[in-house]
Image (spheres, rainbow, N blue to C red):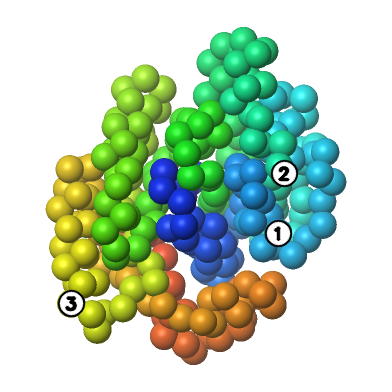
Amino acid sequence: MKVITVTNQKGGTGKTTTSLFLKDALIEKGKKVLLIDLDQQADASYGTGVEYDPSQTTYELLTQDLNLDDILVHVNDQLDLAPAGNQMAKLDVTLTQDHMLDAQFILSDKLEDYKNNYDYVIIDTPPALSMAVMNALTASDTVVVPTQADLFSLKGLGDLGSTVAAIKRRSNPKLTIAGILIGRYNSRTIFSKAMTTALTEAAQSLQTHVFETKIREAISVKESQNAFQSIFEYDPKSKVTHDISNFVDELLGELENE
C-alpha cells in the first residue's frame, strides 16, 4: 500500500481536484483506493457523490473517538472514503486541549491494520500547516504538490520543504516529495513557460522536480465534477484526460522505482 498526500500550504492550487482525478486514474488502472479527506471544506468527500454521517468523519478519527472502520464509506468496489466535516476546523485546538502525546502519529497508527486492504491511499489536505497536515505527512510515503504557473504559487514552497524535511528527521524518514504538478496550464503563453522555469528552480531546492506532464486548463474537468463522474467516464478522449493519464503514469513510474 502506497500513501500519497496531496498538499500545498497555499490555497487555490487544485489540491482537491488533483486528489479526485488521481483516485479516478488509479481506479481506471484497476487499483483499490482509499480517499482520506482532512480538509474542513470536505470538497473531496462531496466530490465522490455519496452521503455520510457528519458525526463520523476524520475529525472523530484523529481525536480517537472513532476508529477507521467506524467512519469508512463504501463508494464502490474500488473506492472507500474517509470523509471530512467542518469539525476539522477545531482539530488543532482539541488535540492541544487534550494534551495528546505524539498526536501527529494518529493517522499513521490508524492505517497500520489496513496495509493489505488498499493499493493506494490518497490524502487531501487543507491549505495550512496544521495537525491534519502533520498527520498526513507522517503517514505518507510521498507528497504531490499541485500548483499553477503563476507568481503566487512560488510562495510557501520553501515552508513546505522545511516541513517535509522536519517530518523526515523526526518521524517519517521514508517521506519524499514526488514532484510539483502544474495545473491549469496554458502552454501558449510566455509567462507560463517562464513560471515553469522558476518552479523548476524552486523544486531543486526541495530536492524534487516538476513533473514533465502539465494539466491543461479545461472546462471538462469542472463539468465532470459537477456530474459526479470521473473525467475518464465524462470525457475519455479529451486532451486533459490524456494529460491526467500521463501524469499518473509518470507518478507511478517513480513510485515503482523507489
Q: Amino acid at mark 3?
A: Ile
Amino acid found under the numbered disc labelled 2: Gly
Secondary structure of the residue carrying numbered label 1: helix
Is residue 151 rendered to the left or right of residue 1?
left
Residue 59 falls left or right of residue 150: right
Distance, label 1 to label 2, CA atoms, is 10 Å
Q: CA distance from mark 2 to mark 3?
A: 41 Å
**In the rendering, at what x and y percent does residue 81 appear?**
69, 51
Return the residue at label 3: 190
Q: Position of residue 146 (x, y in %)?
A: 39, 57
Type of residue at label 1? Tyr
Q: Earlier in the sequence, mark 3 or mark 1?
A: 1
Label 3, label 1: how far apart the Cα atoms are: 36 Å
**Disc 3, SS:** helix
Disc with the residue nearer the chain's start (1 vs 2):
1
Q: Residue at x 33, y 25 (%)?
A: 166
The answer to whether residue 69 is left or right of residue 189 is right
State the residue lying farthest toward the front. Answer: 152
Mark drawn on residue 85 = 2
Tell how many labels.
3
Report whether residue 243 is seen: no
Residue that numbered label 1 is attached to: 46
